[in-house]
Image (cartoon, rainbow, N blue to C red):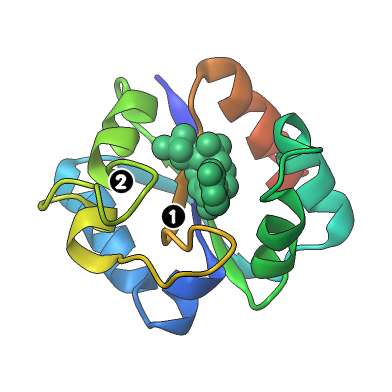
Amino acid sequence: VQRSLVLVKPDGVRRGLSGEVLRRIEAKGYTLAAVELRTATPEILAEHYAEHEGKPFYGPLVEFMLSGPVLAVVIEGQRCIEGFRSLAGATDPTAAAPGTIRGDLGRDWGLAVQQNLVHGSDSEESAAREIGIWFTEL
Ligand code: ATP
């Protein structure tokens, strides 16, 4: 069965939307395999966002991800990687379809980085890699 790493980013935790994100995951029928509130570190983020290093939004992205705790979650279920990305909606919360987490709860704040509430792994390979970064014991 597939696993995916989901993060409720600092904007989501700050706005009190952690429970709402978990509710939508569980309502979809996915299982929570691990949930932990934690503060990222520059080291964790350098690994997690290695593919974005050098992009113009990289610095603001890391700064944003360090601005408060994140809820790190491992979800489980058939095709949950694709399924959670459908639940999350498009990267840009203004463009994200209504009915999705970002479309229903997010908006553009005019900042250097898109504060779009959640992250979800985009492939089995990145899920395995990201779960190893955030949950060293799994
Ligand atoms: P998706 O793959 O749906 O975009 P993601 O979270 O995996 O979701 P990435 O493309 O991996 O998105 O980018 C990582 C994060 O960096 C985004 O979620 C967003 O917070 C930020 N980001 C991405 N592209 C931009 C951009 N052009 N301008 C500002 N911030 C961005």
Mark 1, Cα crowd under 10 Å, few <14 / some 14-19 / many 20+, is many
Residue 38: quadrant of the picture: bottom right
Q: CA distance from mark 2 to mark 1?
A: 7 Å
For residue 50, above or below residue 126: below
- Looking at marks 2 and 1 on the same chain, the residue that comes earlier in the sequence is marked by 2
The residue lying at 48 percent from left, 26 percent from top is 122
The residue singled out by tag 1 in the image is: 118
Tell me the SS state at disc 2: helix
Tell me the SS state at disc 1: strand
Q: Is residue 2 left or right of residue 94?
A: right
Label 2 CB, ligand 1: below 8 Å? yes
> Which quadrant holds the C terminus?
top right
Residue 21: quadrant of the picture: bottom left
Q: Residue 48: percent from the left, percent from the top?
A: 72, 41
The residue lying at 23 percent from left, 61 percent from top is 23
Label 1 CB, ligand 1: below 8 Å? yes
Three-letter amino acid code of the residue under disc 2: Ala
Q: Nearer the viewer, residue 73 or 99?
A: 99
The residue singled out by tag 2 in the image is: 88
The residue lying at 25 percent from left, 35 percent from top is 86
Please indicate, yes or no, whether residue 104 appears anywhere in the rendered image. Answer: yes
Q: Residue 70: percent from the left, percent from the top?
A: 58, 67
Q: Is residue 120 left or right of residue 46?
A: left
Mark 2, Cα crowd under 10 Å, few <14 / some 14-19 / many 20+, is many
Q: Residue 129: percent from the left, percent from the top?
A: 69, 28
Three-letter amino acid code of the residue under disc 1: Val
For residue 10, above or below residue 97: below
Q: Nearer the viewer, residue 113 or 119?
A: 113
Disc 2 and disc 1 in contact, CB within 8 angstroms: yes
For residue 80, above or below residue 118: above
